[in-house]
Image (cartoon, rainbow, N blue to C red):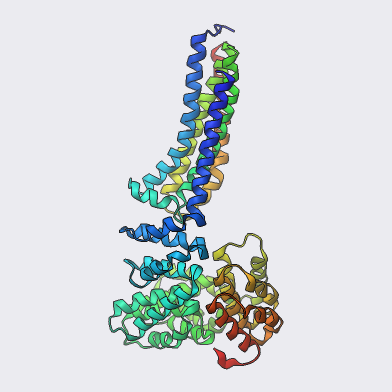
Amino acid sequence: MNAKPMVVDDQRRYGFYTALVYWGLIASGLIVPWGAALINDKGDFRQLIIHMFAPGYNVYLIGAFGLAPMAAFAVFGMLHVGPAISRLDGHIVKRRWFGFVLGAISGVAVSAWGHISIATSRDAQAAIGYIFLPFLVIAAHFGGYLAGRLIHKIKSR
Amino acid sequence: MSKRRIVIHLALLAILICAGIGLYVFMTGRMSASFWTDALDSKDNKTGLVAAQRLESIGTAAVGSAPKLLNMALSGPSLNNRSSAARALLWIDLQTASTAASEAISVFLNSRDSNERYRALQVIEALSPLSTDVAPDLIAVVRDKSQPSIVRRYALSAVIEMMEPKRDVIALIGEELSDPDESVRYEAILNVGMARDPVFKDILGDIKLAIENVNASGQTQYLGLLMQAERAAAMRQTAFLDVYIYQINGIFNDRQGLEYTLKQLKLLGPMAQKAVPSIAKLLNDERPYIRLLAADALAEIGPAAKSALPALDAALNDGDPVVRKHVESARSIIRGNQNER
């Protein structure tokens, strides 16, 4: 245990970064699926807006499907890291924060891979992937979280 | 990070989610009817198309959009826009849809311009339950090899959608499976393959012949479709019937699923007698188009649907005059007066 105790400045810094990851995740939850749809629409924003509520496209709903796992993990992160920061518990904060960040990155990466693959697939049946993708993303979030904690544990030995 | 800040972040997310749900409910619900009606005026074809599709899903609550949809169905910028507007009218206002069908039939019968005629055929096909009077003319056009192939092809597609008179249309499909014109032959193969229906039992020989021809010419894209059709045609009709009844009684019955099922039951005709109680219940459906299709399906079942007569009698007071007309016709047919249709 070589962690230094937290000071008020650290508390502010970690609070700010936690909020940043929290809102970054929520923004990614919408940007990733809509961005993938935009790639599919060859960068045409007007087309994307039309497809938002168009039967057969439902890009808006796909965005909601993309947001759900990321918002869930963001809430988990906020409730998990936030109270530790307020307790000024340096070691726990860093361990949890590391897990939160790695979980966020892995979830966003899996989501981006999934959404782009489905949106650019030539087979219309690929759309069934939208049902399974949130479960895969949530698994990636928590897999990344555990990995982050493990890496931090090994590093701090 | 204080508890207060955590709560603020969570509350902001909750507000964002509620706003998102609110926007979705608004844009896909009845309240958005005027928004999508205005979008019909867009110069962009695709926006107009999406607006027509959205209004279709809103249904009768979007009755204010009927004049614009009628205009789009008859003179819309693209074929997709025209047929989508016509389809939307079926779910929104049957009387305006009847007007659109009559206009399109008039253009098809009177125009000499083949482009105008095939555009009219798209509307006739989209409004098939209201355009059945023109079916004999369509069959004649398909059989007339001197007609432009685009008109023959779309006439075949429209008459297959109507499937009335059923026996004649099925015989026509059998003939057209070996039409010398590839586009007409394609339409026949595509429809018989996609329908996967035992009603094609009567043309099983034609399907087998088409499989041999397609196999000989190496057109593998049609082979799978035709083999599917062959398998379906050889199946017992009752096997399909149970699935259709299950679908009608299902609690998750979506609009288009119900439309498809009722059209399939209509195709089965007297074989669908077992489904009569389920179909009769749909005469009370809140959607006029579903009530119309239910009456049509009962009419096709004919005297075997006698148990539905009380429900049909009650439906004579239906608020929609187009539905009433179809109910009256169904009653007469079930009572044995075959000349009604």
Where residue B163 appears, as percent x and y from the top left, is 51, 80
Q: Which of B1 and A153 is in front in this view?
A: B1
Depicted B234 relative to depicted B10: above or below: below
Q: Which of B29 and B307 is in front in this view?
A: B29
Depicted B273 relative to depicted B250: above or below: below
Q: In which quarter of the image is the C terminus of chain B?
A: bottom right
Q: Quadrant of the N terminus of chain B?
A: top right
Where residue B86 appears, as percent x and y from the top left, is 43, 70
Q: Can residue B217 be seen in this view?
A: yes
Depicted B122 relative to depicted B135: above or below: above
Where residue B34 appears, as percent x and y from the top left, is 44, 58
* Residue depicted at x 48% and y 10%: A9
Q: Quadrant of residue B267?
A: bottom right
Q: Nearer the viewer, residue B146 or B215?
A: B146
Depicted B296 relative to depicted B288: above or below: below
In the displayed structure image, the side of residue B113 where residue B189 appears, left or right: right
Q: Can residue B240 be seen in this view?
A: no
Please identify the residue farthest to the right as the structure is shown. Answer: B307
Where residue B26 appears, as percent x and y from the top left, is 50, 51
* Residue depicted at x 70% and y 75%: B277
